Amino acid sequence: MVVHNQLSGNPEPSRADKEVTTKLIEAGNILEINLLDHLIIGNNQHFSFFSHGLIPK
């Protein structure tokens, strides 16, 4: 699981957030480690890549 905060306060993922998540999934596949979720925290809210279907089960 990866968690980070957005300095802007907006928890919506940026293009870079999506690209990093894809690379983490690919690296995890090579190492046989599943990425469970990537959470972005901001303004007392969060965005979950898993909940939005952006990380496979």
Image: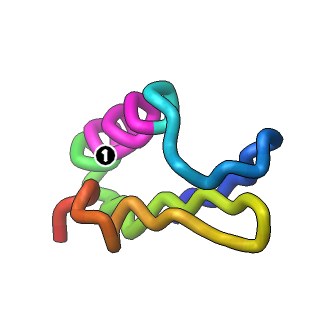
Kind of element beneath mark 1: helix
Which residue sits at x=45%, y=66%?
48
Q: Is residue 43 left or right of residue 46?
A: right
Which residue sits at x=44%, y=27%?
15
Which residue sits at x=27%, y=58%?
55
Q: Which residue is mark 1?
A: 25
Residue 31 place in picture, x, y as percent: 31, 47
Number of residues whose C-alpha sits closer than 10 Å to that of mark 1, classed few (under 14), some (14–19) or many (20 or more): many
What secondary structure predominates along the stretch shown in magenta? helix
- 50 w.r.t. 54: above or below: below
Pick the front one: 5 or 43: 43
Residue 30 included in the magenta stretch of the image: no
Which residue reaches farthest left? 57
Pick the front one: 19 or 12: 12
- 55 w.r.t. 19: above or below: below
Q: Is residue 56 left or right of residue 50?
A: left
Q: Is residue 42 left or right of residue 51?
A: right
Callout 1, which amino acid?
Answer: Ile
- 44 w.r.t. 25: above or below: below
Report the span colored magenta.
Answer: 18-27
Which residue sits at x=73%, y=46%?
6
